[in-house]
C-alpha cells in the first residue's frame, strides 16, 4: 500500500473527465495537499481540454488504467468513469493497495459489490468512499442533528423522493444502456435512499424492503427508471421513496418526516423562503416555522431558530451546485487520519443493499429482509 506521510501531498490517479469528473478534478487542484499524477480519459481531446482548464499539463493524460494502477507513487484512485467501470476498477485498485474514491454507484453487479465489501474487510487500512453527495448538504446535516436530538420524537414515517430526468444528451447517452448504467436506483434514486438511511440512523436501522418498478414511459431506458420503494425499520417506522429518472419537471427531492412530537417537510420546487418547514413540541411549542424565511421568523419571534443565509438545500441536479469541495476534503482527511468514512464501501453498504433488495423484491413480488443474505442475492442476480 502506498503510504502517505503527515506533511506529504496525496498523490492521485484520476479516471474520467466528464461533467462530474471535471468538477471534482478542479476541486482537487484547488487544494495544496494534493498532486494529480495521471488522468485516464478515453476522449483524448476532452482530457487535454480539462487538464488545461485546471492548470495541469496535458502530459498527465495516460492511455490505460494499468499505467495508473502500476504507478507505485499513487496513493489513491479517483473513479468518475461510467457506472459499469466503478466496480472492476475499484477492485483492481484495492487489490493494488490503493485508496478508492468512487462516484456512485460503487458497483453495477452484485458480485462486484460483494467483492468490494470482502476486500475492504480484509484490508482495514484501505480508505474507500462512495460519493453520496447529499450527505454533505447543510439542510441534510440539520435534519440528521434534529432527529438525533429527538426534536420530532420517535420517527414513525419518512418519505424522501428523487424525481429527476437525468441528463442523456450527447456523450451521456450511455445512461440509456443497462449494461453501462446499471439500474435506475444506483443511477440517482440512491440519493434519496442515502438521505433516508442517514436521517434515521440515530433512531433505527432498515430491516426489509418491498418495491415495484415501471418500464420507461418517456425516454428509452433499458432498465426500469421508475421505482416505488418501501423500507421498514427496526423501530416500526416505514420509509417511502418515489424515484423517477425518466421524466420530471426540474429536481424533485421532496422530504416529509413525521414523528410522535413533530414533523419536518422540504419541497425542492418552491421558493427558498418556503422550502423548509417544521414543527416540534420540544423547540417550537408545536408551531410551524420556516427556518429559511428570515422575515417570517423575525415577525413571529422565532429569529433564534433561523438558519444561516448560506444554508444549502438539495434542490438542483447540477453538480456545480453540489458540495463537491466538502466530499473531496472529507475523503482526503479520512486518508490522512486513517479513519473510515461513514460513506466507505462497508459503512454505506446498507444503501446499496436496499437497492439490490428493491430489485429482488420487484422481480419476486415479495418483501426482502435486510441485511441481505449475500449467497441468496448472488444466486438471484446470477440468474438475471
Image (cartoon, rainbow, N blue to C red):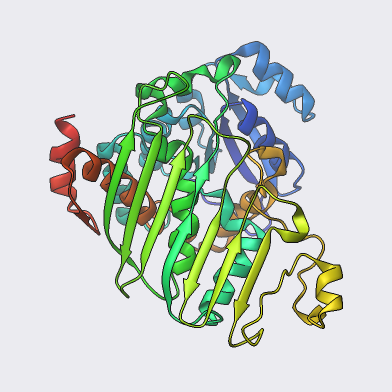
> Could you tell whether 238 is left or right of 339 in the image?
left
Q: Residue at x 29, y 42 (%)?
A: 212
Above or below, 154 relative to 101? below
At which x and y percent is residue 74? 55, 38
Residue at (67% x, 30% y) in the render: 22
Q: Is residue 255 left or right of residue 203?
A: right
Q: What residue is drawn where x is 35% and y is 70%?
A: 237
Instruction: Where is residue 2? Give x, y as percent.
Output: 50, 46
Q: Is residue 31 left or right of residue 255?
A: right
Residue 133 visible in the shown view: yes
Would you say residue 343 is visible in this rendering?
no
Q: Nearer the viewer, residue 195 or 37?
A: 195
Given residues 120 and 134, the one toward you in this image is 134
Estimate the x, y position of residue 110 in percent, counting from the top left. 27, 39
Q: Is residue 272 left or right of residue 121?
A: right
Q: Is residue 371 above or below residue 45?
A: below
Screen quadrant of the C terminus: top left
* Closer-to-camera residue (19/119): 19
Residue drawn 30% across the image and 54% down it:
122
Residue 219: give x, y in percent of width and height.
47, 20
Amino acid at each position: 500500500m502506498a503510504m502517505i506521510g503527515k506533511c506529504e501531498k496525496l498523490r492521485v490517479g484520476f479516471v474520467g473527465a466528464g461533467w462530474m469528473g471535471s468538477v471534482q478534478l478542479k476541486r482537487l487542484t484547488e487544494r495544496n495537499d494534493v498532486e494529480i499524477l495521471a488522468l485516464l480519459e478515453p476522449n483524448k481531446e476532452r482530457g487535454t481540454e480539462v487538464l488545461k482548464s485546471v492548470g495541469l499539463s496535458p502530459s498527465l493524460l495516460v492511455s490505460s488504467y494499468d499505467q495508473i494502477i502500476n504507478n507505485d507513487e499513487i496513493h489513491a484512485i479517483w473513479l468518475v468513469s461510467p457506472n459499469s467501470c466503478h466496480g472492476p476498477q475499484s477492485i483492481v485498485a484495492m487489490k493494488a493497495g490503493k485508496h478508492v474514491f468512487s462516484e456512485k454507484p460503487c458497483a453495477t453487479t452484485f458480485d462486484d459489490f460483494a467483492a468490494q465489501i470482502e476486500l475492504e474487510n480484509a484490508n482495514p487500512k484501505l480508505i474507500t468512499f462512495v460519493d453520496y453527495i447529499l450527505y454533505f448538504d447543510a439542510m441534510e446535516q440539520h435534519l440528521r442533528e434534529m432527529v438525533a436530538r429527538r426534536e420530532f420524537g420517535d420517527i414513525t414515517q419518512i418519505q424522501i423522493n428523487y424525481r429527476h430526468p437525468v441528463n442523456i444528451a450527447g456523450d451521456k447517452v450511455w445512461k440509456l444502456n443497462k449494461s453501462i448504467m446499471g439500474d435506475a436506483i444506483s443511477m440517482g434514486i440512491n440519493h434519496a435512499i442515502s438521505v433516508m438511511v442517514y436521517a434515521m440512523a440515530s433512531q433505527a436501522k432498515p430491516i426489509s424492503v418491498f418495491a415495484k418498478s415501471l418500464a420507461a414511459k418517456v425516454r428509452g431506458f433499458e432498465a426500469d427508471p421508475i421505482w416505488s420503494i418501501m423500507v421498514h425499520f427496526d423501530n416500526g417506522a416505514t420509509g417511502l421513496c418515489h424515484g423517477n429518472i425518466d421524466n420530471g419537471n426540474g429536481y424533485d427531492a421532496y422530504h416529509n418526516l413525521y414523528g410522535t412530537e413533530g414533523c419536518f417537510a422540504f419541497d425542492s420546487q418552491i421558493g427558498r423562503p418556503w422550502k423548509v418547514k417544521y414543527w416540534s413540541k420540544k423547540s417550537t411549542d408545536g408551531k410551524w416555522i420556516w427556518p429559511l424565511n428570515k422575515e417570517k421568523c423575525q415577525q413571529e419571534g422565532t429569529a433564534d431558530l433561523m438558519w444561516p443565509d448560506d444554508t444549502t438545500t438539495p434542490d438542483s441536479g447540477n453538480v456545480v451546485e453540489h458540495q463537491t469541495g466538502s466530499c473531496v476534503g472529507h475523503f482526503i482527511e479520512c486518508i490522512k487520519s486513517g479513519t473510515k468514512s461513514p460513506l466507505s464501501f462497508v459503512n454505506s453498504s446498507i444503501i446499496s443493499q436496499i437497492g439490490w433488495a428493491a430489485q429482488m423484491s420487484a422481480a419476486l413480488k415479495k418483501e426482502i429482509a435486510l441485511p441481505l443474505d449475500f449467497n441468496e442475492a448472488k444466486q438471484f442476480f446470477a440468474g438475471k
